Amino acid sequence: MTQSPKACVIGNPISHSLSPKLHGYWLKRYGLPGEYTALQVTEGDLEETLRMLPSQGFVGVNVTLPHKVEVLQYADQITDRATLIGAANTLTFKEDGRIFADNTDGYGFISNLRQGAPDWDPKSGPAVIFGAGGAARAVIVALADAGVPEIILTNRTRAKAEALRADFGARIRVVDWVQAGSVLEDANVVINTTSLGMKGAAEFKVSLDALRPETVVTDIVYNPLRTPFLKAAEKVGCTTVDGLGMLLHQGVPGFERWFGKRPEVDEETRQAVLA
C-alpha cells in the first residue's frame, strides 16, 4: 500500500503560520489523500531535519524564517529564480532523496497583484519599493520579469538598498528614505515589503500624499489585512491589494508538485484561511 504524501512548513517560530490551514483546506476541497503540518525547527537542527523527512514519507516542505537562505546550502538542485533571490521557500524531495529548491514568493506576489488589480500594466511606469530585505529581492525579480521599466528602491538603511542595486543592476534607482514621498507621484505601483505597520511592529510613517488615484498600492503584510499603509492609499483613491493573496498564491506551485493538483486561489480559499 502506498503511503499518502506528506508535506509541512518549517520555521522558528512556526505557530503563527497560516500554511497548514491553506494546504489543509485545499486537500479537503479536492478530496486528496495527504497531510500538511507545521514543524518547529531550530537553526542547529535544520540539516538533520531535511535529511530525515523524506524517509518519513514527506514529499516536500515550505520554508519560512529564519531558514530561507540557509536551506540553499543543503539543496542538490536550485532554480534560477531561487539563486537570483538568494533564498528558497519551497523544497521538493525527489524519490532518490535529492532536494530541489525553488522560490515562489515572487510568483505569489505577482499573481496576487494581477488578481487584485487586473488593469495593472507593469510596462506603463516605475515601481516604488519600500524595504530591501529578502522579500524585496523576490519582488524585484518578479517585477523585472513582468517588464517593469524602472524600480525605485528606498530603505531606512540606504546601504542595504545600494547592495540590492549592485546585485540587480541599472533598472534600480535608490532614493533616501526621507525623500521617498517625493518619488510617489510618478509611480505605477507602490509596494511595502517592510514589516512596518504589521501587528506589533512600528508604524509606517512615510507620507503617501503624493500618490495618484490610478496608482496600484500593495503591502506584503497581512496582519492586519488593511494596514495603515493601505488605508492611507485608499484615502487617495488608489486600488489597493492586501498581502494575504501573496501567501495564498506562493503556496500553489508546491501544492501542485506534492499532491498532484493545481489548486485555485479564490474568495473561498481566502475565507477558509481567515476563519
Image: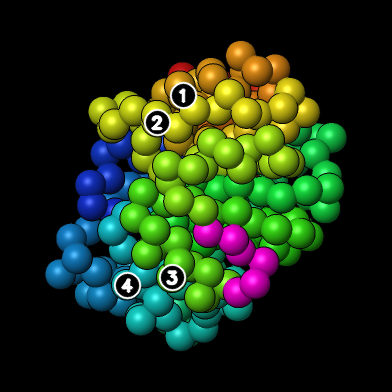
Q: Are marks 1 and 2 in contact (CB under 8 Å)?
A: yes
Mark 2 to mark 3 CA distance (whole Å): 23 Å
Q: What residue sits right under mark 2 in the picture?
A: 204
Please state which of the two labelled residues, at mark 3 or mark 4, is closer to the viewer.
3
Q: Determine crowd level at label 3: few under 14, some 14-19, many 20+ residues with C-alpha closer than 10 A.
A: few
Is 260 left or right of 114, judged from the image as shown?
Answer: left
Which residue is found at the position 39% from the left and 58% from the top? 158
Dot 1 falls on a residue whose secondary structure is: loop
The kind of secondary structure element at disc 3 is: helix
Q: Which residues are magenta?
A: 169-174
| Residue 175 point in image, percent of width and height | 51, 53
Residue holding disc 1: 227
In which quarter of the view is residue 6 placed? bottom left
Residue designated by label 3: 163
Residue 205 lies, in percent from the top left, at: 39, 29
Q: Earlier in the sequence, mark 3 or mark 1?
A: 3
Q: Nearer the viewer's eye, disc 1 or disc 2?
A: 2
Q: CA distance from mark 1 to mark 2?
A: 9 Å
| Amino acid type of the residue tagged 3 in the rendering | Ala
